[in-house]
């Protein structure tokens, strides 16, 4: 056998892809880009990392056809060496995430509030990269567990990178960074057994939080439908902490940041979220990617709640306490801009995995307050990148590099990509007087200055390990949250507590948690106790008795949902005998209303987007049954078809059915209501919403 024959025996030539090191468009950064395999192109040759052309990418170098592999095979050794080191440590929290590029456009300039560059002029555009994540699960875990979602945005502003590293809930479990490692240890898989993955529904989490009354408000949010979003595109985001805005005159205003989804808020119901885990591990990642890919760009409005010291002092909670919100009714959210995500990452690892957010990345015009949780974060995020990305030079990775000039005298370190010229690596220097480049200098007029009063929003004083007095009110806002929900949302919260606490094996933990809930709302505690078949325990002692705050409609998803098909997907089930005209008509109707149609059939070759068994209705916002009687007769014996309809009904979705499909509705136990229609305009109208009043028919509400 000749060497040539050998090569052929390895693999067919697929025209391969090679990698060339190219200069990025702006010339500021370097990017690796994949190029097509045009062999006429010099760049198309496969090379080693040293640029040596590779003659054979199929066979290692051997001593004879059946002999051992030779150590001198530098091509094989380099390939395996690089492969062996492809994985980097995952984020200790928020390991699983999806990201996208986009643009933030200022819609209302607020120079009177802040000198932050992106907010100086209406129409001003700032590039952004956003990453959404679950918190507890590892990098390979699923997208739809009940979990808080990270909502992190990096603004590449003209005055440096500003990272708004928030969540989809406006409060947090703990008040002081001192407790963060305990919280994370408790929520992640249990230390001895290595499970459960990506869920808080286990002993150690509930043990910890039931011993930490400050977590109660966040637990109400976590048990609400906020933590089972329908899509990353349909959830709110929050900066959580109170920040400071500072204007050009140095005047400061307190600020809470909000992101409001243009598509409106939409969540799943719990059974649907659980089924989505089985149907598609990547449900949210795929949804985001595909929406951007088809030009259906997700967008959020950026809102500010701004207030002064006087307002802060008048509230019955401490604005420096990250377990508290500021009700929107008391301090309205003013919209100042819109973020649109319009470009998928070209490479997941290079961008979504390597992006490094840090709440300490602020720009002139944004400053901190003395929130003790925020202060821990200001340290932690920079620190963690050294472990994860392996070098202090992680800011040079293209996704992390600022897009404005970046010059200083920091030097060297692992993976240094820059080649600074000359001798100037210290300051002050007078090298310029000798005709050399003396390097950059500080800028007192335009550089970042920290807001002058050193109390940074709190009261400076003696060094004490202590919390401010109002931090001890752990229940008033949890009560306000519960009482602001619709009856259906309250039932979901009860159901979530019952589900999670049923996974807790140690009974004293369940009991302790219910005793805390009595401080929130007696109805909530009683219903959860009943759901657990637990005798109602006495109320836990409260460090500060809760007060009754005015309910806030802004806290409810259902009261704020947008009735629309935009961004929503209708699953259309059809069979071998369905007329193509009917499918075309349905597609037009759905698309005219701003939605998209996903065609499902028992056999994919019938022209379907998905095969029935792999396309459960949990993946869709509404379903249309475009079946003939003959097709229906066959599908009555197919469990996946019956489940398709049964789940859509149980998940409170609109069901449009052709006359030929009615037997399937009967078999699936569908009862007539406003959400069950023919395949006409009424269906399109119904598909814009969920039918929460159907719930008592399909679920034993506790
Ligand atoms: Fe984080 N958090 N966090 N966190 N966090 C991280 O940073 C930390 C907190 C949030 O998409 C880590 O780069 C401490 C609140 C998001 O890459 C780490 C404390 C909020 C992301 C870290 C908190 C968040 C992180 C892990 C308490 C909402 C993902 C990897 C003092 C306002 C960002 C990393 C991304 C990630 C520490 C609490 C949001 C370890 C110490 C509150 C969205 O640095």
Image: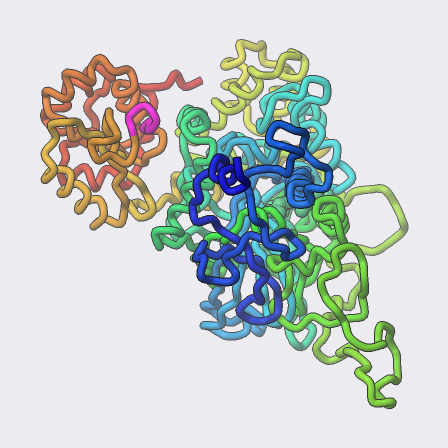
Q: In which quadrant of this rendering is ligand 1 seen? A: top right
Residue 664 in the image: state x and y as whole percent. Answer: 19, 19
Query: Foreground: 253 or 643?
Result: 643
Residue 677 shows in the view = yes
Q: Which residue is drawn at 59% across and 25% down?
A: 197
What is the basis of the colouring in this image? rainbow
Image: 604 above or below 637: below
Query: Foreground: 596 or 294?
Result: 294
Residue 116 shows in the view = no
Magenta residues, start to end: 611-617
Question: Please, which residue is most extreme toward the front here?
Answer: 1
Query: Foreground: 441 or 645?
Result: 441
Q: How many labels does the image show?
A: 0
**Residue 492 lies within the magenta run:** no
Q: Which residue is drawn at 55% across and 69% down?
A: 118
Instruction: Write down the quadrant of residue 467 in the picture.
Output: top right
Left or right, residue 608 beside residue 94: left
**Residue 615 lies within the magenta run:** yes
Left or right, residue 142 beside residue 290: right
Instruction: Write down the quadrant of residue 536 in the picture.
Output: top right
Instruction: Write down the quadrant of residue 610 in the picture.
Output: top left
Residue 686 in the image: state x and y as whole percent. Answer: 23, 37
Query: Can you say which quadrant of the picture contains the C terminus?
Result: top left
Q: Residue at x 14, y 23 (%)?
A: 661
Q: Which residue is drawn at 79% across and 59% down?
A: 455
Residue 535 in the image: state x and y as whole percent. Answer: 58, 10
């Amino acid at each position: 056998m000749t060497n040539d024959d050998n090569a052929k025996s390895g693999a067919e030539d697929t025209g391969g892809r090679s990698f060339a090191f190219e200069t990025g468009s702006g010339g500021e950064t370097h990017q690796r880009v994949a190029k097509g395999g045009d062999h006429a192109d010099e760049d198309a040759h496969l090379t080693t990392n040293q640029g040596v052309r590779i003659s054979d990418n199929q066979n290692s170098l051997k001593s004879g056809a059946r002999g051992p592999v030779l150590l001198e095979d530098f091509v094989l050794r380099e390939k395996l060496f690089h492969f062996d080191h492809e994985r980097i440590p995952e984020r200790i929290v928020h390991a699983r995430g999806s990201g996208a590029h986009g643009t933030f456009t200022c819609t209302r300039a607020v120079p009177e509030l802040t000198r932050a560059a992106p907010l100086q002029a209406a129409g001003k555009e700032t590039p952004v990269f956003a990453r959404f994540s679950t918190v507890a699960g590892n990098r390979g875990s699923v997208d739809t567990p009940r979990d808080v979602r990270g909502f992190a945005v990096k603004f590449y502003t003209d005055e440096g990178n500003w990272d708004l590293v928030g969540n989809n809930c406006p409060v947090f479990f703990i008040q002081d960074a001192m407790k963060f490692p305990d919280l994370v240890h408790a929520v992640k898989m249990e230390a001895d057994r290595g499970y459960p993955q990506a869920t808080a529904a286990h002993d150690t989490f509930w043990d910890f939080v039931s011993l930490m009354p400050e977590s109660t408000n966040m637990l109400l949010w976590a048990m609400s439908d906020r933590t089972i979003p329908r899509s990353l595109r349909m959830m709110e985001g929050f900066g959580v902490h109170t920040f400071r805005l500072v204007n050009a005159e140095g005047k400061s205003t307190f600020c809470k940041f909000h992101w409001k989804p243009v598509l409106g808020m939409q969540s799943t119901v719990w059974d649907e979220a659980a089924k989505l885990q089985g149907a598609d591990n990547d449900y949210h990642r795929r949804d985001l990617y595909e929406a951007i890919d088809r030009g259906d760009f997700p967008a959020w409005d950026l809102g500010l709640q701004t207030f002064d010291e006087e307002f802060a002092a008048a509230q019955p909670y401490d604005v420096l306490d990250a377990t508290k919100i500021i009700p929107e009714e008391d301090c309205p959210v003013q919209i100042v801009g819109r973020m649109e995500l319009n470009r998928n990452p070209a490479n997941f690892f290079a961008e979504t995995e390597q992006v490094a957010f840090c709440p300490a990345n602020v720009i002139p015009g944004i400053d901190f307050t003395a929130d003790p949780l925020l202060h821990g974060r200001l340290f932690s995020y920079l620190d963690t990148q050294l472990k994860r990305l392996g070098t202090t030079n992680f800011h040079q990775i293209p996704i992390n590099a600022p897009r404005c000039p970046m010059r200083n005298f920091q030097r060297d370190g692992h993976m240094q990509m820059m080649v600074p010229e000359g001798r100037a690596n210290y300051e002050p220097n007078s090298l310029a007087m000798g005709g050399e480049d003396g390097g950059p200098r500080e800028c007192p007029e335009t550089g970042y200055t920290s807001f002058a009063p050193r109390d940074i929003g709190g009261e400076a004083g003696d060094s004490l390990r202590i919390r401010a007095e109002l931090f001890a009110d752990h229940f008033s806002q949890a009560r306000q949250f519960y009482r602001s929900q619709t009856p259906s949302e309250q039932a979901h919260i009860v159901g979530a507590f019952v589900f999670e606490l049923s996974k807790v094996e140690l009974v004293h933990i369940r009991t302790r948690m219910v005793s805390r809930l009595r401080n929130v709302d007696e109805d909530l505690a009683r219903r959860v106790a009943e759901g657990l078949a637990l005798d109602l325990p006495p109320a836990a002692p409260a460090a500060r008795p809760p007060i009754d705050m005015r309910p806030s409609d802004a806290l409810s998803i259902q009261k704020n949902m947008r009735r629309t098909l935009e961004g929503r997907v209708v699953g259309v089930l059809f069979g071998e005998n369905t007329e193509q005209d009917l499918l075309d008509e349905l597609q037009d109707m759905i698309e005219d209303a701003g939605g998209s149609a996903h065609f499902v059939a028992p056999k994919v070759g019938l022209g379907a987007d998905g095969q029935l068994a792999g396309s459960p209705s949990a993946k869709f916002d509404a379903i249309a049954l475009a079946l003939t009687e003959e097709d229906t007769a066959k599908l009555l014996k197919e469990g996946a078809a019956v489940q398709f309809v049964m789940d859509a009904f149980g998940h409170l979705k609109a069901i449009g059915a052709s006359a030929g499909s009615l037997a399937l509705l009967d078999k699936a136990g569908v009862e007539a209501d406003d959400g069950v229609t023919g395949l006409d305009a009424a269906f399109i109208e119904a598909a814009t919403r969920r039918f929460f009043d159907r719930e008592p028919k399909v679920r034993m509400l506790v």
